[in-house]
Amino acid sequence: MRIDRVFRKLANTLPFMMAFVDNERRYQFVNERYEQFFDVKLDELKGKLVAEVLGERSYKRISQIHSRVLAGEDVSLREKVTLRNGRVLQLEVKYVPNQNQRTGKTNGFFAIINDVTHYASASEVLRAVHDVMNKQSVGLPTERINKLLKLGCEYLNTDIGIVSRVIDNEYTVKYAWSTGDPIPPGTQFELGNTYCSVTLAASDVIATRHASTSKEFSGHPCYTAFQLETYLGLPIRINGKVWGTLNFSSKTSRGTPFTDLDKELMGLLCSAIETLIINNSKTDRLERLAYTDFLTGLSNRLFINEFFERLVYQNRERLNHYYCVLVDIDHFKQLNDQFGHDAGDSVLQAVAIEFTDSLRSDDVCARVGGEEFMLLIHADDKVDIANIVERLRKNIENLKIEHDDEIITTTVSIGVTKLQEQDSFNLAYKRADKALYQSKSDGRNCCRWN
Ligand SMILES: Nc1nc2c(ncn2[C@@H]2O[C@H](COP(=O)(O)OP(=O)(O)OP(=O)(O)O)[C@@H](O)[C@H]2O)c(=O)[nH]1
């Protein structure tokens, strides 16, 4: 086929790549789009065998297709190709055979090529978001959010994906995925020191792939601190209010600019994450309810039992540093009978406050029965725990609980046991209960050990 000037001009205006290969399988023409995309010149290709240009091995795969096309068949296919620079692309190729007008014989074929890499990975993201949201097997909301962050990073080709909670000027990492060092949830920054301050001020999706030279980001404290060149962030809204941000970033500059499609897709990812955050808070709430004693707000027996089992599972040796303290209000039936059930409730609440005020953060306190409490206290030694328990006993004895113009006082009996490596929850409970029984027998308002 003769490639004339008019044809060449027309072919060079086309928004897709085009090549003409003759029936000897030699390149005869490629348009400018093709030259730019594959970084080759027509002059270098003209007259060369396709097998020679692609390499025998790569050509083996498509040689049969070329045979079909040269036999007169139209063929369309989608192909994954790896460029010399290592970039993997998805190409949509349509082969159209060309007949000699005089003889009617096929004298070659046109290959019309579209780069659909972007659309292909976008549709993969859509499918993956659907799976993460709908497959039961993916797990709890937290696991699903982490999967979405990984997905976003892979699609955008960034190293870090974060869901942050923003309250006033405080930015807290809630969920994070990173190709490098892990970013622990709970890590905090001043909002003004993060690019998300720009996102929240704009109240929209904001992106850059050259932060150091961009109008919005150059000189930003976040660049000074972390040298993040690439950033895409958008606000997370729960019930119409800004809750935090979804953001992706990298120290390296992204190869290609962010497109509208990238921004749309991240918007979709953000909506999925918003749904998961709502689900997570519902799960949290249900979990809190299941583990909380509704009258005192303390933990309940289920919680302290599981806390104990976690200690055993993580490191049995840690049990050696804990004491199990059982506290029972004295003559509580009498108190109920004398002042009424409501007054009894107020006493339970006042005693509970005393516990929460006196214990440290790694101690646990639960209401394990009507007027019985269990404390797992981390203490250095017996003297330390004896002091803590005695202080508690005295404080409760000195409480003046106001109820309906009455001032009620109360006392407690206490049983203590040191936890041992081979303990189970029930074993420890039994020993502490025996000690408690002893303190009741010895006249109440005292502490006994077992
Ligand atoms: N007000 C109130 N009373 C409760 C609650 N749960 C259990 N009780 C009452 O607590 C009382 C416990 O009585 P007992 O087990 O005889 O113990 P006690 O009177 O404290 O006697 P000692 O333990 O031997 O000093 C019962 O009367 C229960 O009805 C509660 O949630 N609120």
Image (spheres, rainbow, N blue to C red):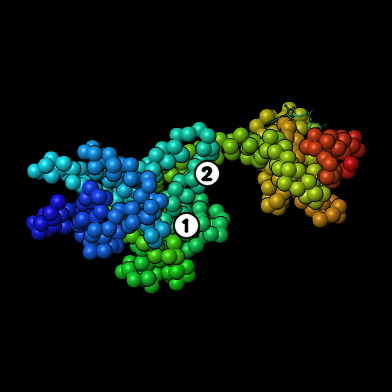
Residue 167 percent across, percent down from the top left = 46, 55
At x 10%, y 57%, the residue is 4
Cα separation, mark 1 vs mark 2, equals: 17 Å
Badge 1: residue crowd in 10 Å (few <14, some 14–19, many ≥20): many
At x 9%, y 59%, the residue is 5
Left or right: residue 73 versus residue 443 is left
Residue 129 in the image: above or below residue 150: above
Residue 350 percent across, percent down from the top left = 68, 42
Q: Which residue is mark 1?
A: 160
Kindly indicate whether the residue at mark 2 contacts the one at mark 1 (C-beta within 8 angstroms). no
At x 72%, y 49%, the residue is 363
Residue 36 in the image: above or below residue 134: below
Nearest to N terminus: mark 1 or mark 2: 2
Left or right: residue 316 versus residue 442 is left
Q: Which residue is mark 2?
A: 142
Could you say whether the residue bearing mark 1 is in a helix, strand or loop? strand
* Quarter assignment of residue 446: top right
Q: Nearer the viewer, residue 334 or 269?
A: 269
Ligand 1 located in image quadrant: top right
Q: Nearer the viewer, residue 354 or 386?
A: 386
Could you say whether the residue bearing mark 2 is in a helix, strand or loop? helix
Left or right: residue 359 versus residue 227 is right
Badge 2: residue crowd in 10 Å (few <14, some 14–19, many ≥20): some
Q: Give the amino acid type for the residue marked by disc 2 in the picture.
A: Thr
At x 34%, y 45%, the residue is 62
**Mark 1 residue CB less than 8 A from any atom of ligand 1:** no
Residue 294 percent across, percent down from the top left = 62, 35
Left or right: residue 185 versus residue 303 is left
Residue 106 percent across, percent down from the top left = 18, 43
- Residue 407 visible: no
- Residue 66 visible: yes
